[in-house]
Each structure stands twice: as structure tokens, then as C-alpha cells.
Image: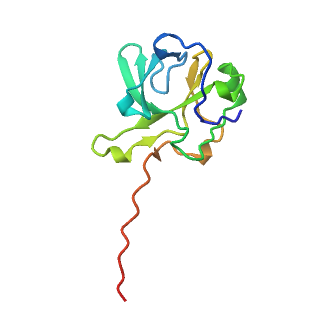
Amino acid sequence: MKVLPELYPTDFDAPPANEILLPYGIIGFSAYKRAELLYLPDHLPFLWMKLHGPETLQFIVIEPGGIVPGYEPELFNEDADALDLRSSAEVMILNIVTLRSQNPVEATANLIGPVVVNRRTRLARQLVISNYSRYSAHHPLVEPAQAPVALRIA
């Protein structure tokens, strides 16, 4: 299934507090089966994914539509079936962001292993996309500034 990471308006019923269910957790955190998606208007386009489990953990995530040009993740059919995805409009893609506190301009997003959410059921899994070779797990969110060009005087 090819997934377009556009932001789709949804007519689906949302569970309380923007909860998503992660039956397998996320990579490295399999004990965390529930999460809430939280946002602060001043932090957009970044969202907080608050994992509930033995402790509370929080990850910064983004919906890549409009932020990562050309990002077209494709899911394996088995993964789409496991999430009961009926159309691409049901899909919410969340990419985990790595933010370096010393230099936030160097923030990167994991485009290879997004958290894929079924908007209708709120069932979610972190998956490796089938077209992973086109993307990076450390995709820069801000393009590096062009090196200054020396002015030549003739």
C-alpha cells in the first residue's frame, strides 16, 4: 500500500485524550502499549507522543505532510492488513524526531521507521516501510545553510 503523508481531515470518532494503542510498543520500548498524542500550539508542527507503561516516556514526533517534501512511504501489505487499513485516508504517519539540545537546528526525523496509526481504530505500530532505501533514519528537518560564497573582485 502506498501511503501519502498528507494531512487528511477525519470524520472518524476519536478516542478520549487522543489515545493510540501500540500492541507491540515501539522499537526498544515493547512494554509501552498505549500512547497519547499531545500538542501545544507554540510547538507545532511538533507533537508529543506520551507513552504509558512502566514509566511515562515522551517522544517528539511530526506528521511529515508539508514538512518533508517528496516523502511517500509505502507499507508492506501484511503491515497494512495488521492495522486494518482500508484506504490511505485512514493512515496517520508519525516520524520520531531526534532533537539535540545543544543545537535544535540539527533536528532529524526517522523516515524509515515511522509510527503508523489507523485513524479509524487508533491502532498503531512502528514499522519499517517497504521503500526504506529511498530515505534516512536521520533526515535533517532544516537544510544546512549554504556555505558562504566568496565575493570576487575583478
- Residue 134 placed where, x, y %? 61, 47
Q: Residue at point 61% right, 29% down?
A: 8
Q: Residue at point 60% right, 36% down?
A: 5
Judged from this view, the residue extending furthest toward the left is 102
- Residue 105 placed where, x, y %? 35, 47
Q: Quadrant of the C terminus?
A: bottom left
Q: Residue at point 33% right, 41% down?
A: 100
Colour scheme of this structure image? rainbow
Query: Image quadrant of residue 49?
Result: top left
Query: Image quadrant of residue 48?
Result: top left
Judged from this view, the residue extending furthest toward the bottom is 154
Judged from this view, the residue extending furthest toward the top is 16
Q: Residue at point 46% right, 44% down?
A: 138
* Numbered-mark total: 0
Q: Quadrant of the N terminus?
A: top right
Residue 46 left/right relative to 14: left
- Does residue 4 sit above or below 51 in this rendering? below
- Does residue 135 sit above or below 124 in this rendering? below
Residue 92 left/right relative to 50: right
- Residue 59 placed where, x, y %? 40, 28
